[in-house]
Image (tube, rainbow, N blue to C red):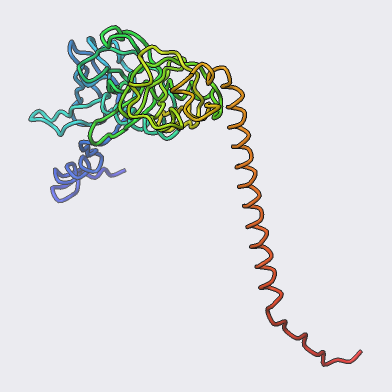
Amino acid sequence: MVSQKPTANQDIGFTHEDFAALLDKYDYHFSPGDTVPGTVFSMEPRGALIDIGAKTAAYIPVQEMSINRVDNPDEVLQPNETREFFILTDENEDGQLTLSIRRIEYMRAWERVRQLQTEDATVRSEVFATNRGGALVRIEGLRGFIPGSHISTRQPKEDLVAQELPLKFLEVDEERNRLVLSHRRALVERKMSGLKVGEVVVGSVRGIKPYGAFIDIGGVSGLLHISEISHDHIDTPHSVFNINDELKVMIIDLDAEKGRISLSTKQLEPEAGDMLRNREVVFERAEEMAEKYRQKLREEAEAKASGTELQEGMQRDFEQTEVSSQPQEEEPISAVEE
């Protein structure tokens, strides 16, 4: 066999250009905002090196490891663990990318609270701080704020720290980083589930305003508007009630979405003005007068239903009349005689 030796003109391998092109073909391009899989390559005192397939191992600092506070990297990551990472910044002068887990958790947390708001869910969270405006909690790792007007408790705000509260969502705005919740709405909704329009309940006066009195009924507040105190004219609720007065009131409206309970004593008056002259007779006959009110509501509902049925029936009759009044097409004459 004759062996052939390569000559100077023969192609004996890759040129520098070929090798560079091959490297470029298999080199991955990473951009900030991408989510990529990576494996923990090395644990560092204040972070970790992550192999994501780049030329240089990427780095994740400890403050980017979780949406919650992390003191040591091993609280979140373990050697050789593989998981998703968010590319936070471009390569530095050493060709190293900076990664984040916190940003992934942050995006998923907002997605979760938006879903909870859509479902009108009630969530529970522990108060971790208070300020002049209200209280602070964490929902799915996000910081949420409860305005003071939406905290339904007689305790000082400072005493709420470390207490777990039921909460409803008022505002979920990722762009403005605003997560606002209501303790009052959660309590009112829970209380409302056991209340009915037309029901008589016992409450106590907790606040008096020019437009009405706020009545505590089992831990939630309902408004007894000045127009619903009596059939007789009243200049101011202060002339009728004192703080801590116990009353029998009737529920005339429940608005779960707004967390409002509307009350009345006017509808319980046997005679117009009894709330001003002799409220005891109003309370003695409260159930009797409430039953009359409920009967009135039933009659109105039946009349409305009958009216709806009548209107629908008239509409059907009208449509049938229109159809019957349309000219009928003549049947074609067959060309074949039987």
* Residue drawn at 21 percent across, 39 percent down: 23
Which quadrant holds the N terminus? top left
Circle count: 0
> Foreground residue, 266 or 294?
266
From the top left corner, tell me how far across and down residue 157 is, in percent. Answer: 27, 12
What is the quadrant of the C terminus in the image? bottom right
- Quadrant position of residue 104: top left
Spot the residue most to the right.
Answer: 338
Please provide percent x and percent y for residue 231. 46, 32
Residue most toward the left?
93
Q: Residue at x 58, y 27 (%)?
A: 290
- Residue at image position (31%, 13%) is 127
Residue 91 x, y percent position in the rendering: 14, 32
Residue situated in front as seen by the camera: 237 or 71: 237
Q: Position of residue 273 (x, y in %)?
A: 47, 27
What residue appears at the point 63 percent right and 52 percent down from the top-left corner?
A: 307
Determine whether, in the image, residue 62 is placed left or right of residue 105. left
In which quadrant of the rendered view does residue 146 lie? top left
Among the 4 quarters of the image, the one containing residue 54: top left
In depth, the one of 29 and 255 nearer the eye is 255
Q: Is residue 73 above or below residue 56?
A: above
